[in-house]
Image: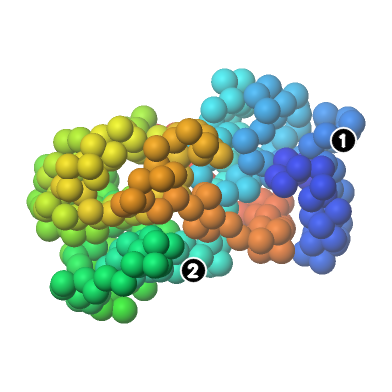
Amino acid sequence: MRLIINSGGPQAIDEWRAQFRVFAPELDVAGWQEDVDPSSVDYALVWAPDAGRLATFPNLKLIISAGAGVDHILADPTLPRHLPIARMVTARTQTEMAEFVLTSALMITRGVKRIVDNQSRRHWEIFDSLRVAADVRVGIMGLGHLGVASAQLLSRVGFPVSGWSRGASTLPGLPSYAGQEQFGDFLANTDLLVCLLPATDSTRGILNRDTLSRLPKGASLINAGRGSHMVTQDILDALDSGHLDQAILDVFEQEPLPPESPLWSHPGVIVTPHCAAIPDRKERARHTALLIAANERGEALPNIYDPQRGY
Ligand code: GLV
């Protein structure tokens, strides 16, 4: 049985092979650049595969995304649409994302960016009003595995948390809003908006002028969803007008974020390099091995992309 891997480039293939020797010794692991007989490929573990390549494997059974999102796979116009695509959602991904959101929320609450900027100018400034977690109402958009894990961790630390999803998902034990009708109420009660939505046609550009204007003045934003959720100029305008206080952004329409982007130097913005949740190769190999074994046994697989929902 052959697994072909496009994740981490040719330099990562030795580590992938070493990991799969532990978790699935029977698998024949091939690198994306290797010249393999296309009909010998049963499984593909990929991040942003070059368009057209997946369609050349006639016996492919399952595409496994190397990340939680699948937008980087759906971007291939020749993608064999009949094949299932598994999203990489592991316990470790959830923990990493939840801790990224918690760290960001505390940094925003305590004004860490301003303190660090002050330090670089040797400027001693004590803020007038010190906020604690209980003062900052966090609203999480997107109530999948990552949204729920983040909500639970922030709630344990003392942030009042609510959630919003386009569909009917809810946050166990916490207030949840759903759909377009409740979007305004959700935003009006949110001091810190966290975007963990999937990238779909209906979420494109959702972090726009209209959405931001419905947050209370002085609210802040964390985006660890996708760059396509943001209308960047609208976010910059909201920061410049003071309506938005701070933003921590992990994802961008163009990555790496180009050096000329005004986001790099905006005093209200922290840029992080799409690093919120990246499970290591060991974790991803373990998860991939479990998926392949379950698929070979004919079992239903978790977190399969649903074209109806778009994620
Ligand atoms: C990263 O953004 C992922 O989809 O896991």
Query: What's the mark number on residue 95?
Result: 2
For the point 40% across and 53% down, which residue is it?
A: 270
- Residue 62 locus on image (x, y percent): 66, 41
- Residue 260 locus on image (x, y percent): 48, 33
User: Callout 1: few (<14), some (14-19), or many (20+) C-alpha neighbours within 10 Å?
Assistant: few
Q: In the picture provided, is 215 more to the left or to the right than 279? A: left
Q: Quadrant of residue 21?
A: bottom right
Vertical relation: 211 (above or below) 219: above
For the point 11% across and 53% down, which residue is it?
A: 216
Query: What's the mark number on residue 34?
Result: 1
User: Decide: marks 2, 1 in contact (CB < 8 A)?
Assistant: no
Q: Amino acid at mark 1?
A: Glu
- Residue 182 locus on image (x, y percent): 13, 47
Q: In the picture provided, is 130 more to the left or to the right than 75? A: left
Say whether disc 2 or disc 1 marks the residue closer to the N-terminus. Answer: 1
Number of dots carrying numbers: 2
Query: What's the mark number on residue 20?
Result: none
For the point 57% across and 53% down, which residue is it?
A: 88
Q: Is residue 130 visible?
A: yes
Q: Amino acid at mark 2?
A: Thr
SS at mark 1 in the image: loop
Label 1 near ligand 1 (CB < 8 Å): no
Q: Is residue 203 visible?
A: no
Foreground of the two, 214 or 123: 123
Foreground of the two, 46 or 117: 117
Vertical relation: 255 (above or below) 225: above
